[in-house]
């Protein structure tokens, strides 16, 4: 990770790129800390040390830990963009396509860390659990509705359970051999189970 | 569930049931705290308050938090006992049988709390994650081996991912409508996805 430590003031002067890159550095450091340590253990102090800034600056930029968490764990790519792609093509292969898209999405470091930040943090922090609920309601339920079939809300919640279970087993525990498989291998295991809820 | 907990820590006098029931009270309180709060937030002080004992007594009985966690999150019924039952009958229904057994197992308060304690705690505490790995290796891998098919280790890890994902979505987040369903309804959603790895 590169550190481009710059001017700490949030007011943008328009003359130098400092505040933006500092904010980005803090966000990236926070995302990594929440992803690796979960909500409670990712302290302002650890996040500041990782971003190589003063802890007071983190507070100045983000105010509260809840706000910092929300900003840091926001995904750069949403699940709904993935799922839209999976709707193209042979319906009998939709589970495998969705699994492949999900695994490819997790290859992106920021996306994976944002997901892990939410999963680890939701285990103890209600604000993180609420973000997971909103993500499912806002993204997976409309997807489940589009693919048709009864009970879109129930389908969305079991799909979410499968995604989370896989991420949890592969990255949080981590469980072998799942942790060492390629994304394509995982997709081959996950796809048929997703397929159950896509037809 | 029967509790056959015997000889606690200090010497048993055989005259009064005090130490046994105190130890049990502490274990039950710890299990509830770890299940609700996760490893970090379940402090000795909170556990002691819940068991209505002095925090020093918790230390006296269990020594360290790791030891208390291990004792509190040990399951009264193991997954392997469940899975053995699921091996009887029509192989095409094995997933549904296993899902039903798992849901019935979760109806038991102690079993559910032991599972939740591990899942919430594994999100941040390596010792808890190690217990999850051991449970999967010790119980699900032999089960996957018995039901046959290639890659028992891989099957065990994806089965574990499905169990955990469901528990996580139903109890940790919790996600609706999964959280409000009856165990039988959840089994009907979960069963077909388990079935994928049981044939």
Image (cartoon, coloured by chain):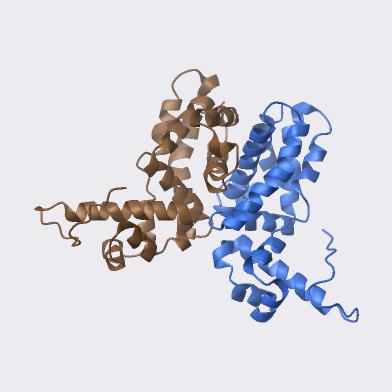
Chain colours: A brown, B blue
Q: Quadrant of residue B111?
A: bottom right
In the image, is A183 to the left or to the right of B54? left
User: Percent position (x, y) of residue B37?
Assistant: 57, 63
User: Percent position (x, y) of residue A190?
Assistant: 57, 32
In the image, is B65 to the left or to the right of B184? left
Assign the C terminus of chain A to one quadrant of the image: top right
Q: Quadrant of residue A7?
A: bottom left
User: Percent position (x, y) of residue A36?
Assistant: 46, 53
Q: Nearer the viewer, residue B138 or B2?
A: B138
Q: Nearer the viewer, residue B129 or B73?
A: B129
Tally the numbered discs. 0
User: Percent position (x, y) of residue A131?
Assistant: 44, 51
Query: Residue shown at 41%/29% (left/top)?
Result: A84
Q: Is residue A87 visible?
A: yes
Q: Residue furthest left?
A: A15
Q: Quadrant of residue B3?
A: bottom right
Q: Is residue A131 visible?
A: no
Vertical order, A46 against A87 (above or below)? below
Vertical order, A193 against B31 (above or below)? above
């Amino acid at each position: 990770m590169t550190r481009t430590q710059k001017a700490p003031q949030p007011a943008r002067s328009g003359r130098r790129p400092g505040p933006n890159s500092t904010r980005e550095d803090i966000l990236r450091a926070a995302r990594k800390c929440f992803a690796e340590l979960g909500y409670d253990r990712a302290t302002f102090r650890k996040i500041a040390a990782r971003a190589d800034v003063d802890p007071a600056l983190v507070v100045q930029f983000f105010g509260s830990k809840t706000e910092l968490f929300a900003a840091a764990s926001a995904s750069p790519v949403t699940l709904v963009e993935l799922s839209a792609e999976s709707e193209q093509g042979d319906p009998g292969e939709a589970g495998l396509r969705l699994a492949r898209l999900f695994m490819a999405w997790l290859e992106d470091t920021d996306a994976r860390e944002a997901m892990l930040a939410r999963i680890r943090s939701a285990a103890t922090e209600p604000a993180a659990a609420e973000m997971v609920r909103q993500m499912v309601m806002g993204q997976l339920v409309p997807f489940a509705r589009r693919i048709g079939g009864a009970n879109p809300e129930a389908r969305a919640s079991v799909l979410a359970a499968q995604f989370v279970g896989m991420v949890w087993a592969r990255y949080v525990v981590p469980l072998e051999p799942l942790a060492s498989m390629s994304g394509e291998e995982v997709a081959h295991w996950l796809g048929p189970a997703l397929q159950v809820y896509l037809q």
